[in-house]
Amino acid sequence: MTKGHLWQGVLAWLCQAGSGFVNFSAPLLITILFDNVLNDYPIEDHPTVMWFVNLFGGVEGWQNNIWLVAAAHLTTALLIAFFVFGRQRLVSMFSENTAKRMKDRLYDHIQKLPYNYHVSAQTGDLIQRCTSDVEQTRRFLSQQTVEIARAIFFTTAAFITMRSLNMTLTLISFAFLPIIFIFSYIFFRAVRRVFKQQDEKEGELSTVLQESITGVRVVRAFGRARFEVDKFIDKNDDFKKLQFKQMKFLAWFWSLSDILCFAQIVTTFVMGIYFVSIDTLTVGGLVAFNTAAWMMVWPIRQLGRVMSDLGRTQVAMERIYEVLDEPAECDTPGATPHDLRGDIVFNNVDFAYGDERKIFDGMSFTVKKGETISILGATGSGKSTLMLLMLRLYDYNSGSITINGKELRDISKEHLRKSIGIVLQEPFLYSRTIRSNLEMAKEGVAEDEIFDATRTASAHNFITEFEEGYETMVGERGVTLSGGQKQRVAIARTLIKDSEMLIFDDSLSAVDTETDAQIREALATRKKDITTFIISQRITTLMNADRIFVVEDGKIADIGTHGELISRDGLYKRIWDIQSMLEAEM
């Protein structure tokens, strides 16, 4: 994820190192001021201090030019500001670039996941993984990686500085660090479990919210607003309880870590006074030592927040990699594009969704090139599954499917899906203009092609009646259009596409019978040698096809023309009789 940007993170750490070591020059300046400039103490016992003093002409030079102390402090402040600016700029670039790369990779991978994954995945949860979880990772990289560097370099610089002042007191002060580290690790292990539960609950909450908003018309139509609100409140309440649990953990941690840190400071100060009283530490050394100890405490105390965010980030990364580790859809080795204008042959095809009962059990039939085939069957009989198999959104378990003489598995999936035009019963329209939705089908489509397709789909007239015409904005999922209007726009979009085969999966169900007839008549005049499948429960939609397939119990139960099928007993005739009677009564 950090490929190409890792150098920015490394440079940010180097800036933090520079800031840490320059910061700890302040205690040295305090020592020089108190002990060497004001009190004229010898400095031979402190080589680090002596080296620094000699840079500016020794003790005498400092005493004669007291302004050097102020200049040194100002220089230190400027250097720290420079390093802090560099650190923040570089770490921001590093975290933002990494987050962008992560989002791009996630979105790209989700597009390549098999159809079956998307059928079972929760949309709200996937959105959260691509947004909240990535954002948590970005925050950790931009904030806590700097804190880790700060803790490391400040502790190192503090040890060097404090050791130069008094080794015994340094060991006493640092004795508290293992206790703080162990305590932080225990906290990290405990809070990580809470973060995982919290993230999962937030995913569930996002799913409920997404479903309620996208399905708002259904909710209103069935008067289920109160039910949806109660469901959201329940999920939100579970999420709130986990938030409180997390806050309780953090409250305990901050309280106990404060006790440990202040115990370190008090112990250091008390022991420092004792060493001053026995003349093993100067007053300036004590002030400098305590200043360094205080400067070290904050990044160490922040270790808890770092560990807390690390736990949350680990959970976020696990959820991100759960998606990235899902195997992408792959093609059959050696699969190539192939002309689909030819006979389609199903030979003894078996298929089942996972471990469920078989949908097809020895399905066999042949469709001639350029035929229009209508398919009728009970709900759940596998009508739509036939089309999903031809698009290779699912692969059949056994048997053979050939198109124009080539086995379906040997035809590339990308070519199949580009060459087969399909219109679903519930078409999806994007929240864009009608024209933009239509232009998605073909790059560089001419306006005449758009008009020709919309006239064939009986959509041109109602589109031009809108005030903005083809520039009319379509609401999310096409919500501003009626069901029939959405279906006709979707049909037009598919007709614009250069398709070698057409599939209409109950895509005329929302239009009236007159419009249905007009669309089918227009399709018949333009289809040429394109094989067309029409799936429907409406006999008037099916009756003019070259042949009609009746699907029952995973097999083709009957095949024939409309006249042939109504002349013999069977599912088709029963449905025809029922629909004819209803039409007569109406």
Image (cartoon, rainbow, N blue to C red):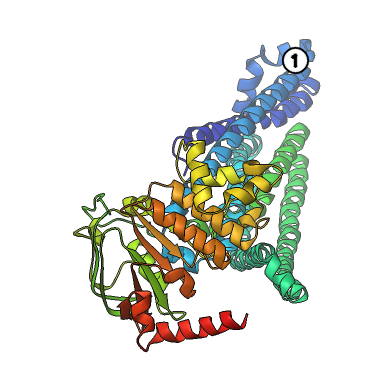
Residue depicted at 66% across the width and 66% down the height: 215
Q: Quadrant of residue 315?
A: bottom right
**From where the camera sits, is residue 414 visible?**
yes
- SS at mark 1? helix
Dot 1 crowding, Cα within 10 Å, few <14, some 14–19, many 20+: some
Q: Is residue 252 left or right of residue 369?
A: right
Q: x, y (%) of residue 470?
A: 62, 43
- The residue to which callout 1 is attached is 68
Q: x, y (%) of residue 475?
A: 67, 52
**From where the camera sits, is residue 431 visible?**
no
Look at label 1 and name its amino acid. Leu
Residue depicted at 44% across the width and 81% down the height: 378
Quarter of the image where the C terminus is located: bottom right
User: Which of the pair 98/294 is nearer the observer?
Assistant: 98
User: Which of the pair 234/82 is nearer the observer?
Assistant: 234
8 relative to 155, above or below = above
580 relative to 38, above or below = below
Q: Quadrant of residue 72?
A: top right
Q: x, y (%) of residue 487?
A: 55, 59
410 relative to 78, above or below = below
562 relative to 85, above or below = below
User: Which of the pair 63/102 is nearer the observer?
Assistant: 102
Q: x, y (%) of residue 311?
A: 58, 58
